[in-house]
Amino acid sequence: MERRTIGAGALAVGAVGLGCMPMSWAYSASRQRGEESLRAVHRALDLGVSLLDTADMYGPFTNELLLGRVLKERRQDAFVSTKVGLLVGEQHIVANGRPGYVRRACDASLRRLQTDVIDLYQLHRADPEVPVEETWGAMADLVRAGKVRALGLCAVGARGGRRTPGPRLYDATLRQLRRVQQVFPVSAVQAELSVWSPEALDALLPWCAERGVGFLAAMPLGNGFLTGTLRPGAGFEPADLRARHPRFTAEMMAANQPIVAGLRRIARRHGEDVTAAQVALAWVLSRGRQVIPVPGTKQERWVTQNAAAAGLRLTPRDLAEIDGLPAAQGSWD
Ligand SMILES: NC(=O)c1ccc[n+]([C@@H]2O[C@H](COP(=O)([O-])OP(=O)(O)OC[C@H]3O[C@@H](n4cnc5c(N)ncnc54)[C@H](OP(=O)(O)O)[C@@H]3O)[C@@H](O)[C@H]2O)c1
């Protein structure tokens, strides 16, 4: 698989990464099967999909524990990317950016991941009660202590972590990036980027490109929608984030079908086995050499399919057709 680099330290990873969140968090709990997820992670590493993206809050904690079972045996094949700064409380998810907490959280992640170093440690959300420079300074100390190799920042919402793609969200992220960059170099930014959520292209990617900062494209498959495997109106379990997501009502899923149809049309031109998911990922990969999509899955078959997207080259005609697809309907608020 093609390799791409992250940050000034030029850390090399497979061009397609693996988002591990669906193995333990955010999607249907009844479909989370540990053994299947373990097979998916092994398959990823076999195929050169080295960047494994997780967070201490996924589960909480169980996602890192799961990865630790693989890393114990295959640490040299993987690039471990985890996150700090969010805690799952009784009622809400809360931010904690206090330096002492960051230090303890890192040690706990290292134990769960069964490793002595985290390749990329990302600030999941800044704590509104703590100047971000203090949190970032504590993270920088972890690099100096050899517990972490590089630092990353996840895009933040203007309203306390709520995910709202658009200029307001990325303005806040850019302000944070400028502040933390004064303290210690940013090696990667993680934000949503997909055919139906392209906002980061103009708002964040240029900042990364100018500085050689990696860009981890979260939700590159539009939470599964862009794969064309979800049926409008089929419904989601209450714990599935899509049950409350405005773009996943039956009405909006039906309204956005032309996007999937367009991706399928392009896929067919590339061969019978090529899928809409692969076209969606190839589009993300085509946005810049510093972009690394982290499609989420817990299934070996999807890992295999998504890894193959690294070899799919979209033509100028394909790219023009994707540009011409209708904008997604359904606000995020
Ligand atoms: N920084 C942040 O705040 C943040 C927020 C959200 C996500 N992320 C990161 O981004 C990663 C990706 O986001 P995501 O997982 O929410 O969304 P996604 O990658 O856009 O979509 C994931 C969904 O697509 C399905 N899928 C994956 N490959 C497929 C294929 N080839 N064909 C059909 N279906 C396929 C998965 O199904 P199965 O689950 O059944 O395999 C899963 O339901 C996460 O895992 C996480 O690491 C970060």
Image (cartoon, helix red, strand yellow):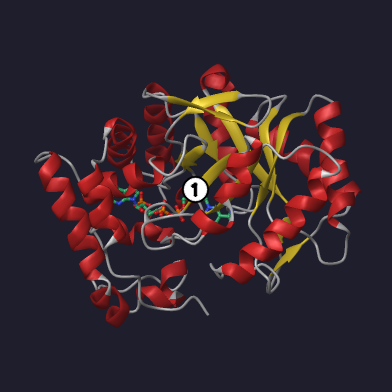
Residue 24: image location, x then y, percent? 50, 51
Left or right: 73 with respect to 133? left
Residue 118 is left or right of residue 315, and the answer is right
Q: Is residue 46 above or below residue 40?
A: above
Number of numbered discs on residues: 1
Q: Specify whether 153 is left or right of 286.
A: right
Query: In the displayed structure, would residue 236 be above or below residue 117?
Result: below
Q: Check the image and report above or below for 236 versus 286.
A: below
User: Compared to 258, does 134 lie above or below?
Assistant: above
Give the left or right position of residue 251, taking residue 237 as reference.
left
Give coordinates of residue 81: x percent, y percent.
Answer: 61, 37
Q: Secondary structure at mark 1?
A: strand
Q: Position of residue 216 (x, y in %)?
A: 54, 44
Ligand 1 within 8 Å of disc 1? The answer is yes
For disc 1, the marked residue is: 217
Q: Position of residue 1 (x, y in %)?
A: 37, 23
What's under tag 1, amino acid-wise?
A: Ala
| Residue at 52% over, 32% down | 51
